[in-house]
Amino acid sequence: MSRGLQWLIGLSIAAVSGVTTGLAFAPFGLWPLAFLGVAGVLAVQWRTSSCRSTVLGFVYGFAFFVVLIPWMTVIGTDAWLLLAAYCALWNAAFGSLVGPLSRLRGGTLWVASGWVVMEALRGRVPLGGFPWGEIAFSQGNSPLAALTSIAGMAGVTFIIVWIAALSIESVRRRRWRVVSGVLVATFLVSLVIPRPFEFGGESSTAFVAVVQGGTPGTGMEAMDVRRAVLQGHVEQTLALAAAIDAGEVEQPQFVLWPENSTDIDPFRDPTVAADISTAAAAVGVPIVVGAVVLTDDPTKVENTGIVWDPVTGPGERYVKNHPVPFGEFLPFREQLAPLIGRFERVPRDFVRGDSPGVLNAGGIVIGDVICFEVAYDDVFIGVIDGGAQLITVQTNNATYQGTAQPEQQWDISRLRALQAGRSVVVASTTGVSGFIEPDGSVTARMEEGERGYLVQEVALRTGRTPSTVLGAIPEILAGGVLLTGLVIAMYIRRRRRAALSGSGDVRVDA
């Protein structure tokens, strides 16, 4: 077989593997394909040169993210392809290590650890990172989802990549017993462990309400009519209050509004404050409002969750810890704004909060998370460490209505419920809103485009899962394993070079 044909076959397999992995995620949700996709790209990278493996990694990553994030076309086709290419660079960097690591004894462990480290770095750097697309996020409907409460997202990703790598080695060595045993043991454990696996703490229940008020439009113009968005959420809350008074639904302990339920600062506009107060007074409990709040710096604003009491008005609030680069703040503004006209839609930068979203709403300690923060481990660990009994997710998916983004976010929220052992309550402007139990099951859901409210009894818990206790330790351990593997690979390479340059009698076996 010619070298050119080998390259063509390898590139084709890498691209198909990327597409296959993308199909494991929502809206397709074919979770077993995550194993096949990862195994496919590792198969063509296994024991090959670093250069070849790097190129194959980029092709795989680009194909994967093109399938995963087509919702970025709402912003622009160029934004979609550029973000896919950027994320693919991380797969290329990891690919450069697959060749040398796969030649070592125990190569499957080194490679699986490397994948975990790659995702950990992509989710943190630069500018706060982009964790969307972690392999574990595809497993919401898989038995492996139960393992998130023990080993977190990093642990589930490790298991998937490890099994894929073991499969390659089993084919290569014609030894199927090991990988078959690991597969059977993994899925048996996934089926028999509690969902979630937690210990300690207390458990109770409470009624909570969610309001989905809608927006006049969708896409990039979704929030242009800011007063209408606020009015929609006020109207639905007043309808909820009427249903409570009529005995049609239970009185909740608080009401959750979505992110951007008011883009007009209620601290600067008294009419907005009056509208929110009217809604809170009617329902008789606090409303957790998603608001854009101005700061003393006219170029800076805050994306906040505010607990609005029916008697005392605004109280505790949370400022989003992970604002989205190029969406909520513009890095290198002076250099980029004159070159790219659409950045005029980001005239001010959202500042980053520095405290977790632990708030008291109607006597319940909630852990507030805003939009894309569902993908960040540190946000969830932070609110659980702060004593949150319940997770609230405030999101504005109006920009991406009709795309895969709301469903992908919903799947991540389900996994977070399992990981943290907490009920998760999601409020979106246009959907998907609803209630997720600590075991990841859905008890109520409002679809995209609907307007209305939901009231549901939810579990309140204070126990801990091993995952929330361990935090980033699995990723740190993976980093240590990867570093060890790289040191061994460098040592063996030096010995081989020394052998080649010395007496021809020395033999080094990797």
Image (cartoon, grey):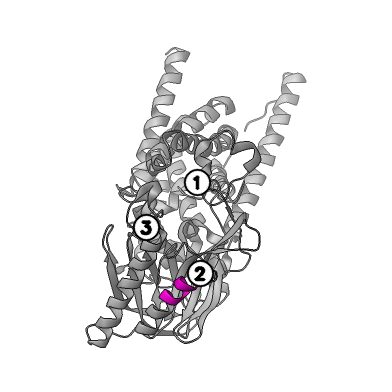
Question: Is any atom of residue 332 visible in this view?
Answer: no
Disc 2 designates what residue?
269
Q: Indicate the amino acid at tag 1.
A: Arg
Confirm or deny contact between disc 3 and disc 2 (CB under 8 A).
no
Q: Main secondary structure of the magenta part?
A: helix
Reply yes or no: does residue 273 show up in magenta. Answer: yes
Confirm or deny contact between disc 2 and disc 1 (CB under 8 A).
no
> How many C-alpha atoms fall within 10 Å of the one at disc 2: few (<14), some, or many (≥20)?
few
Reply yes or no: does residue 363 show up in magenta. Answer: no
Disc 3 designates what residue?
411
Q: Indicate the amino acid at tag 3.
A: Asp
> How many C-alpha atoms fall within 10 Å of the one at disc 3: few (<14), some, or many (≥20)?
many
Residue 3 shown left or right of residue 183 in the figure: right
State the residue in front, 443 or 34.
Answer: 443
Give percent across and percent down for residue 127: 61, 48
Which residues fall within the magenta stretch? 268-276
Q: Which circle, 2 or 1, is nearer the viewer?
A: 2
